[in-house]
Image (tube, rainbow, N blue to C red):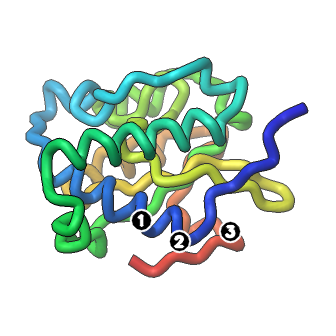
Amino acid sequence: MSNLKSHTQPEIIQAIQEAATWAALKTWRMDNIDLVFRTLPLPDPFHLDPWYTVDWVIKARRRALSQMVAMDSVKEISAKDGQLWVYEPEVSISDGVSSVESAGFLDEHNCPPWDLWVGYVREERKKYVLSWIPPSVVPLAKAGYDTNVEDCIYWLADLGCKLQIEL
């Protein structure tokens, strides 16, 4: 039986702040964008239990951040300029086109970098990974989105999901 868990809005808001802090600490160039936000190891095949995998990434990032900065300073980094991104892994046909167009920001499965994952959400008709996209890489995400044919990636604001989060 598949897991029915979903991250709550308060958990997601905390994870957004942590992802924004994590991104602010990273230095990237166009030739390494595919590696910069994929530094945390994934614990298991994502498709077996997406909630567990996303939750593990959030906790691993939190542990890593606690070694890098005072956790009180996490709230000082603004997430307001970033965008919330929806990825529906069950809908992806994994054609790799969005990966090429986004310079590797999205992988061959249209998946955004897991270092930026902020929650796994189950709604009545949708199950998706929610990511926070830093403002500096929004154009790369948009390029991947614009070439995506299977409609497995969206901006949260455009999707009409039940989940509503103000940054």
Q: Amino acid at mark 3?
A: Cys
Q: Amino acid at mark 2?
A: Pro
Pick the residue in front: 154 or 40.
40
Mark earlier in primary sequence (1, 3): 1
Q: Residue at x 70, y 31 (%)?
A: 49
Pick the residue in front: 53 or 85.
53
**Pointer 1 residue:** 14
**Pointer 3 residue:** 161
Asked which quadrant contains residue 31, the reply is top left
Pick the residue in front: 30 or 86.
86
Q: CA distance from mark 2 to mark 3?
A: 17 Å
Quarter of the image for the N terminus: give it.
top right
Q: CA distance from mark 2 to mark 1?
A: 6 Å
**Pointer 2 residue:** 10
Q: Residues within 10 Å of mark 2 (few under 14, many from 20)?
A: few
The image position of residue 150, as x and y in percent, is 66, 38
Is residue 73 rendered to the left or right of residue 4?
left
Is residue 148 rendered to the left or right of residue 75?
right
The image position of residue 125, as x and y in percent, is 84, 56
Mark earlier in primary sequence (2, 3): 2
Is residue 5 rendered to the left or right of residue 89?
right
- Residue occupying the far bottom of the picture: 166
- Report if the CB atoms under discs 2 and 3 are less than 8 Å apart: no
**Element class at badge 2:** helix
Q: Residue 115's mark? A: none
Compared with residue 114, is residue 145 higher up or lower down, i.e. above or below? below
Is residue 121 rendered to the left or right of residue 123?
left
Q: Residue at x 32, y 57 (%)?
A: 18
